[in-house]
Image (cartoon, rainbow, N blue to C red):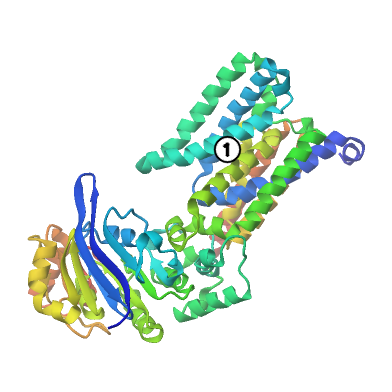
Amino acid sequence: MQDEILRVNNVSFRYAEQDVLKNVSLTLHRGELLGLVGPNGSGKSTLLKIILGLLPLRRGEVFWFGVPLARFRDWTRIGYVSQKASSFNTGFPATVEEVVLMGLTAKLGLFRRPGKKERQAVDEALDLVGMNAFKKRTIGALSGGQQQRVFIARALVTDPEVLILDEPTVGVDMQSEERFYELLETLHRDRALSMILVSHDLGVVSQKMDTVACINHELFYHGAAEKFRDVQDEVVLKTYGREMQVITHGHVLGSHKHSILDACWDASRPTAHDAIVSDELLGNENTSKEATLVGGDKR
Amino acid sequence: MIYMLTHYAFARYALIAGLITGVVAPLIGSFVVVRRLSIIADALAHITLSGVAFGILMGTLSRAMGLVDPVYYGTLFALVAALFIEKLRNVYRFYSELAIPIILSTGVGLGVVLIGLAHGFNVDLMGILFGNILSVTKADLMRIAVAGVVVMGTVFLLYKELVSLSFDEESARLSGVPAGTINFIFSALIALVISVSMQIVGILLVSALITLPVASALRVAHSFQSLIAYSILFAELSVLLGMTASFYFDLATGGTIVLVAVTILLLILLASRLRQYARA
């Protein structure tokens, strides 16, 4: 059996007398790609913050590399790209190189200044995400997709064993999203990185990840992505509730090889819903631009 | 002016104190502005007023206590307030900016009451509020120099932690940067800078020297290091031109320094607008 990297046992979290998470358990093994999906406000980011120690663990257990969360200190083994990374202060006058170098702050320790070795690590991380040519550019001058690559480079610069990405493609255009998933595949292949991808994009997660965890305050599914496809209707109904519908339509873009579950959205947002329905009714074949419409968010 | 500098010690002390302030105020200001905490400097400056007033009151009550320069009490008050601001920001998590007016109004209220109690309205209140660079003594200069070295040394040693926290506090915390400690040290550095700048531009204008050169530098900087370099350049220009102008035209020095800093900002804004037109 592969090494267990993360174990979450019966984690519950209440906020303002409401259950945000209820008895959630899951695992991540070495080299595994785990997709954590659920609608907006389902507790995905809360779970992530708990396992990263950014929110207090009140009920349940979390083990990183077999070490209980309270005693775990080796955070450089974990790379994290937060959802907020895509909405950072774009006026911050930092170069791409300076941003990636920030990833080494804790690893270097207090009072030590980055030297040649650290600058080399920055170059390697930027090469990996294809952004080395931009290293002297100001971060705010880059596109959303390019910024996302820089933030991934910052997470990779410590050479972590796990990469956690919280809604990484929010605010990123379709082409950049495709390139982003290609980059994840490369990283997984070349570096044997384990990954947790938090998303509400059920279609992409079920196709690109090895395992899927469907969460809406409770865990409704945790297992292989292939098996998930067999039980998707039932799980989606439980996870997303009555308001959600699963729409299957052609997905003609590059690496999306299957058209099993391309999109689902919140039917309470009629504009997005109507747009796709009318496309389908009219027999419009060019549905690729709507293919990642998930949970009502239009990208 | 050269004659003044070569013949009068007070003019030299004033110039050196001004030049030190021209480094430390924008150095800390660069972090303050990008963290969107510009108003914190103002709040801490106002609480420094109450500390200075407390010092004056102590001086009237006890001879021994009066031996301590009121500026030290001011710095101490600002340090304690910096700690309170961090606590209050956690109490009002969704209205964290509330911490600043709370501290600011407490500072002014307490300051006025204490000055009244010390019958200190006849003390050089104008000097405290608007600065009096020509009153810098050798002892003041030593205090300013020591504070300046502490600020520069700390920023040099904790540079990467301060930059990481300023850019993305959540990721910095997660990677293991001791955010609580560094944030407190940062607030303490702001308090020290205020104590340094107080005599140069006065409590009411301290935040101007911390933020205005950075506001100008933001329009031309392409990296964080260049932001600091430009900020210091603009602040030093403001200090030197402001002191020269105040000498020749007999103007209030603190106010003139700040007005020069504003003029630099306006010129840079104008230049960027012209450059945009030229490109279009």
Q: Mark 1 — on which chain does it sit?
A: B
Is residue B238 visible in this depiction of the protein? no
Residue A169 % position (x, y): 32, 69
Residue where numbered disc 1 is placed: B79
- Indicate left or right for A258 with A166 as reference: left
Residue B96 % position (x, y): 41, 41
Is residue B64 visible in this depiction of the protein? yes
At mark 1, the secondary structure is helix
Which corner quadrant holds the N terminus of chain B?
Answer: top right
Q: Residue at x 45, y 31 (%)?
A: B102
Q: Residue at x 30, y 63 (%)?
A: A62
**Quadrant position of residue A145:** bottom left
Q: Is residue B194 above or below residue A13?
A: above
Residue A190 % position (x, y): 40, 86
Q: Residue at x 49, y 28 (%)?
A: B105
Most foreground residue, B3 or A43: A43
**Quadrant position of residue A162:** bottom left
- Indicate left or right for A158 with A4 as reference: right
Q: Residue at x 62, y 37 (%)?
A: B206
Q: Is residue A67 above or below residue B144?
A: below
- Indicate left or right for A98 with A272 as reference: right
Q: Residues within 10 Å of mark 1 (few under 14, many from 20)?
A: many
Q: Is residue B205 above or below residue B123?
A: below
Q: Is residue A285 above or below residue A138?
A: below
Query: Tag 1: residue type?
Result: Leu
Residue A274 % position (x, y): 12, 64
Most foreground residue, A227 or A85: A227
